[in-house]
Image (cartoon, rainbow, N blue to C red):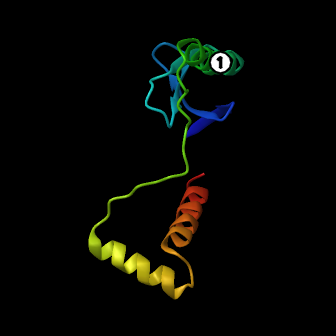
Amino acid sequence: MNTMSHRGYTARVELDDRDSIFVGRILGIRSIISFHGKTVAGLRTEFAKAVDEYLADCKERGLAPEKPVSGKLLLRVPPEIHGKALVVAQAAGKSLNQWATEVLRRAVQAGE
């Protein structure tokens, strides 16, 4: 996956071969914010502009902008997986939260 970042926001970038442009969409927030450019430099400029306009619009309307992530993650897993994960975490001398954070970190690094 191709991504770029600006002011704490990350966007996924793809090539629209049909229109010969790069298209981006900001990830991790409910608002749909997309942008495009004909060149990588143009795409970066449009991304920064999209983020800055979003933040300015929120400020003008008196709304708190969505943050890409809060650091809180709620997962629903089958009870047997939850139980096994808890046992593995405790056997490693860690809380389930510590253990899950390490597992997720390794998975994310492997996917980069």
Quadrant of the snapshot with the N terminus: top right
> In the orientation shown, which residue stands out farthest toward the front?
62
Location of residue 56 in the rendering, given as x and y in whole percent from the top left corner = 62, 15
Up-down relation of residue 104 to residue 15 (above or below): below
Q: Mark 1 points at which residue?
A: 52
Q: Position of residue 23 (x, y in %)?
A: 53, 21
Residue at 60% across / 36% down in the picture?
3
Where does residue 105 sit, x and y in percent of width and height? 59, 61
Apparent side of residue 65 relative to residue 45 in the rendered image (left or right): left
Residue lying at 33% horizontally and 73% vertically, measured from the top left: 81
Please name whichever residue, 62 or 41, is drawn nearer the observer in this view of the structure. 62
Instruction: Please name the amino acid that badge 1 sits on.
Output: Asp
Q: Using residue 42 as the reference point, say whether residue 64 is left or right of it.
A: left
Under circle 1, the secondary element is: helix
* Residue 83 against residue 63 in the figure, above or below: below
Residue ID at (60%, 34%) = 10
Give whichever of 77, 57 is nearer the camera: 57
- Taking the spot 61% from the left edge, 13% from the top edge, the residue there is 38
- Residue 21 visible (yes or no): no
- Position of residue 108 relative to residue 45, above or below, is below
